[in-house]
Amino acid sequence: VRSVVVVGAGLAGARTVAALRGGGFEGSITLLGAEGVEPYDRPPLSKELLSRTTPAWLRDELGIDLDGEDARLGEPATGLEIAPHAVAVRTDAGDLSADAVVIATGAAPVRPAGWGTALTLHTAADAAALRARLGPGRRLVVVGAGWIGAEVAGVAAAAGTEVTVVEAGAAPLATAVGPTVGALTVPWYAAAGVRLLTGSTVRAVTPQGAVLADDEELPADAVLAAVGVRPATSWLAGSVPLGPDGSVEVDAAMRVPGTGGRVLAVGDVAARVSPRHGRLPGGHWDGALREPDIAAATLLGAHGTDGPADPAPYVWSDQLGHAIAAYGLPRLGDDEVLRGDPAGAFTAVWFVPATDQVRAVLAVDRPRDVAAARRLFSGPRLPHLDRTAAADPDRPLRAR
Ligand code: FAD
C-alpha cells in the first residue's frame, strides 16, 4: 500500500493518520474532513459544556500532529468507487485515487422529523449553541436519558438551569444497560434537582418548548434531542454493504469484506467482529482510539502472530455526580449479579445465562472494580468468575 485516503477527521480519522505514520508508513495520506476545523475531542462537549468554551484539540490532548499531512478539513467525501486495483473517493473538488481507503466518518445525532427547533449535541458548534441557551432562570428539556442526555442534564442543572428529562423507555440508560440497572440511576435525577419523566414521549417540538404525547406542554428555552446517533454513511450510497444498524461491518482486522482489503472502517461508523464479544457496534471513544491501530497494522502487514488485537469495549460517563465505567457488552437475557449498594456505589456483572462466563461489568463509583474489569477482559476469551464471589463487594473481581 503506497497511498491511503482517510475519510473523516474526528478521533478515529486523526488516530488512523497517527497510527500509519507511527507504524513507519511513508506513502501519501489524504485526510478529508467535513467540519473545517482540526480534530478535537467530543466527551468534553457534554461533561464540560459550561466550563469550557474552546475545543479540546487532539493535538493538545493526544499529541496528534497533522503538520505536513495533506489534511483537507473542509472537503467532505461525496462518494466511493471500488475498482479491482484501486479505490476512488469523490469530493466536490475532484476525485482522489488511492490503494486503500479508511472510512472514519463517525455517527451523526438523530433529529426526528418535524423537530426543526430541537438542538443536538455532536460538534463544538452544537455545544456553543446549547451553552448560549442555558443558565440560571432558563429551562431545558432533554429528550432521551441516554449517555449524553444524562450528562447534559446534570451539568445544566448544576449551573442553575431548570431541567426536565423525557425518556420513552422504562428507565434511563435502558438501551445500553437494560431496565434493571438503568432504574438504579433514577434517584440520581431528583438528587441533582432534575425532573425525570420515564415512559413518556415527546409528540412535538416547537419554538416554545416540547409537547408530550398526553398533550402536556413543557415550555423551554431549549430542547435537546439526545435520542441516539446513526452511522454517517449516506455518502457511501451503496458502495459497501451496511449492517442492520446502518454501520459499516468489518472483520477483526477492520476490513470491509469483499473489497480485497482496500476498504477499511474504524470508530463510530464501524461495527467490528470481536472474537471475545461477537459483533461490536461503534459509538464509544475508546473504540475510535484503538481501532485505528488495528487498521494501520492491517494495511502495513504488522499484526503479531496472534492476529489483530481485540480491545474490550469500554465506555465511561460522568453523570449527575456519579462516575460510570463499563467493560464488555451485555446481551438481553444475560443474568445480572449486583455487588455493593444499589442505592450508592454498586457494580453490575452480566453472566452468560446459567454459566460462570462474564460478558460485561459496569461499575458506579467503584474504581477498584473498574481496574479489575479491565484485567478481566484483557484475555482472548470471556473470563470465568465465581458468582458468589462476584456478588460479594468485599471480594475482588478476579477470574478463576
Ligand atoms: P466522530 O467523532 O463523529 O468524527 C467523524 C468525523 O467525520 C466528523 O468530524 C464528521 O464531520 C466527519 N465526516 C462525516 N461525514 C464525512 C464525509 N462524508 N467526509 C468527510 N468527513 C466526514 N464516548 C465515551 O466512550 N465516553 C464518553 O464519555 C463520551 N462522551 C461523549 C460526549 C459527547 C457530547 C459526544 C458527542 C460523544 C461522546 N462520546 C463518548 C462518543 C465519542 O466521542 C465517539 O465515540 C467518538 O467521537 C467517535 O469518533 P469517530 O472519529 O469515529 O467519529
Image (cartoon, rainbow, N blue to C red):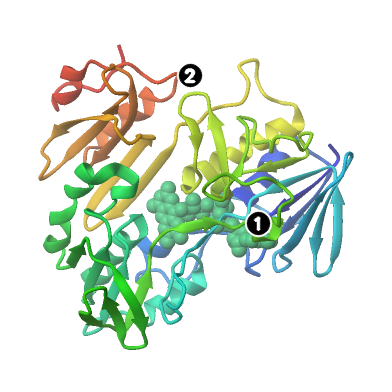
Q: Are marks 2 and 1 in contact (CB under 8 Å)?
A: no
Q: Amino acid at mark 2?
A: Pro
User: Which image quadrant for residue 147?
Assistant: bottom left
Where residue 296 sits in the image (x, y, percent)? 69, 36
Query: Going 49% across and 37% down the picture, which residue do you hit?
Result: 280
**Quarter of the image holding residue 196?**
bottom left
Q: Which mark is residue 8?
A: 1
Say which amino acid is labelled 1: Gly
Q: Secondary structure at mark 1?
A: loop
Does residue 45 appear in this view?
yes
Hey, which residue is sitting farthest top in the picture?
400
Q: Nearer the viewer, residue 165 or 98?
A: 165
Q: Earlier in the sequence, mark 2 or mark 1?
A: 1
Q: Residue at label 2?
A: 380
- Residue 58 at least partly seen: no
In the rendering, at what x and y percent does residue 349 appear?
A: 25, 30
The x and y percentages for residue 189 are 17, 61
Crowd tier of the residue under label 1, counting other residues whose Cα lies within 10 Å: few below 14, some 14–19, many 20 or above: many
Identified at 16% across, 25% down, the residue is 391
Q: Is residue 78 left or right of residue 43?
A: right
Q: Nearer the viewer, residue 106 or 374?
A: 106
